[in-house]
Image: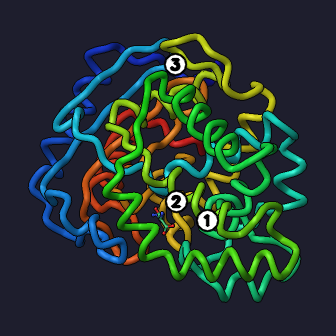
């Protein structure tokens, strides 16, 4: 007998189905008040908490949107996998494994305990320690070039020019004692590859880049499209390196909530304390969402809910 297994994960989706999924996710969670803005970076507490946007960007460059999609917020930790991609490009995925690490920590994004437990490496490029180490690993002659390469790389993934949000940088760099401590621990342990203050400063600039939800969606769609930006056609990552990057996002993209995220959403993704999240459906599309209120792990409540809703409605979880 012929057995036909329905596999919605490999079905194609009509434009109407994608727009409907975005609209439903937006309507369902628009008025959800749970969580609080981040406030350990003082200026993030001032971002209007009710903002909410949801975008799907497909691998052939179509966009499906709802809500406050023009609002620019700081990219924060959503930047981290893209700088890891830059290291893969300049050097290799192997360098990430050897000099930073690829194990999830099961601990918060700013954990110093994780550094003590995993003595040989900075843990993974998606927690603060590994992301500061990634910045230090970028091959550059000086600080200006280090920043230029990182900035240009993120713009290439987004397919648009992206400016630093100066107030966010000032607020974050003037309250960066925790990250400065992490940079110094790494340097002391020979796990940082450039000057600690330079690495911290460029990392903080990276986190202060302003993006809107559409930019995040295109960044994710570039990964969904095997490393080539679907809008500009620019190749940002070798196709064979994309699975390694998505694997790190799948295991560590949500810090100590990564297991819960994979269990409920089934998609590699990355969050930031600015309220943005981007999730990747490999070979198909990316889902980005933005809402400032966060849960205890520092992940946006409504952005998580919206992406889970779309993943489930379209049946695109990778497992
Ligand atoms: O270094 C920090 O703490 C921030 N620039 C980024 C942290 C972050 O986004 C954690 N994400 N959920």
> What distance separates the C-alpha of mark 2 from that of mark 3?
30 Å
Q: Quadrant of the C terminus?
A: top right
Dot 1 lies on which element? helix
Left or right of 144? Residue 10 is left
In this view, the mark in front (3 or 1) = 1
Q: What residue is at 60 percent from the left and 22 percent from the top?
A: 225
> What distance separates the C-alpha of mark 3 from that of mark 1?
34 Å
Quick one: 267 or 162, which is closer to the camera?
A: 162
Disc 2, ligand 1: is the CB inside 8 Å?
Answer: yes
Q: What residue is at 62 percent from the left and 24 percent from the top?
A: 3
Q: Which mark is residue 59?
A: 3
Q: What residue is at 34 percent from the left and 20 percent from the top?
A: 63
Left or right of 205? Residue 309 is left
Dot 3 lies on which element? loop
Residue 285 position (above or below residue 134): above
Say few, some or many: other residues with alpha carbon within 10 Å of mark 1 (under 14 / 14 to 19 / 20 or more). Answer: many
Estimate the x, y position of residue 239 in percent, counting from the top left. Answer: 75, 25
Disc 1, ligand 1: is the CB inside 8 Å?
Answer: no
Q: Which mark is residue 200?
A: 1
Answer whether residue 31 is visible to the viewer in this image.
Answer: yes
């Amino acid at each position: 007998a012929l057995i036909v297994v329905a596999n919605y994960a490999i079905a194609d989706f009509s434009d109407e189905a994608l727009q409907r999924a975005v609209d439903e996710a937006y309507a369902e969670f628009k008025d959800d008040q749970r969580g609080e803005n981040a406030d350990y970076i003082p200026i993030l507490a001032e971002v209007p908490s009710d903002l909410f946007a949801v975008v799907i960007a497909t691998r052939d460059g179509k966009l499906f949107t709802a809500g406050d999609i023009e609002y620019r917020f700081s990219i924060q930790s959503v930047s981290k996998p893209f700088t890891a991609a830059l290291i893969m490009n300049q050097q290799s995925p192997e360098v990430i494994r050897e000099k930073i690490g690829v194990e999830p920590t099961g601990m918060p994004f700013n954990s110093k305990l994780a550094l003590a437990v995993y003595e040989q490496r900075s843990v993974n490029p998606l927690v603060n320690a590994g992301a500061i180490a990634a910045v230090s690993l970028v091959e550059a002659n000086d600080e200006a070039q280090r920043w230029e390469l990182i900035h240009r790389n993120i713009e290439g993934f987004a397919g648009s020019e992206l400016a630093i949000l100066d107030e966010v940088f000032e607020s974050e760099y003037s309250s960066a004692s925790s990250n400065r401590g992490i940079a110094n621990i790494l340097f002391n342990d020979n796990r940082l590859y450039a000057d600690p203050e330079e690495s911290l400063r460029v990392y903080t600039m990276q986190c202060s880049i302003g993006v809107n939800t559409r930019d995040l969606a295109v960044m994710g769609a570039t990964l969904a499209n095997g490393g080539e930006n679907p809008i500009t056609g620019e190749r940002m990552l070798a196709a064979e390196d994309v699975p390694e990057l998505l694997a790190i996002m799948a295991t560590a993209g949500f810090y100590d909530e990564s297991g819960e995220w994979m269990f409920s959403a089934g998609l590699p993704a990355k969050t930031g304390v600015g309220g943005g999240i981007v999730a990747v459906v490999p070979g198909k599309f990316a889902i980005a969402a933005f809402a400032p209120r966060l849960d205890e792990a520092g992940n946006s409540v409504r952005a998580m809910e919206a992406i889970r809703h779309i993943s489930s409605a379209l049946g695109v979880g990778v497992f």
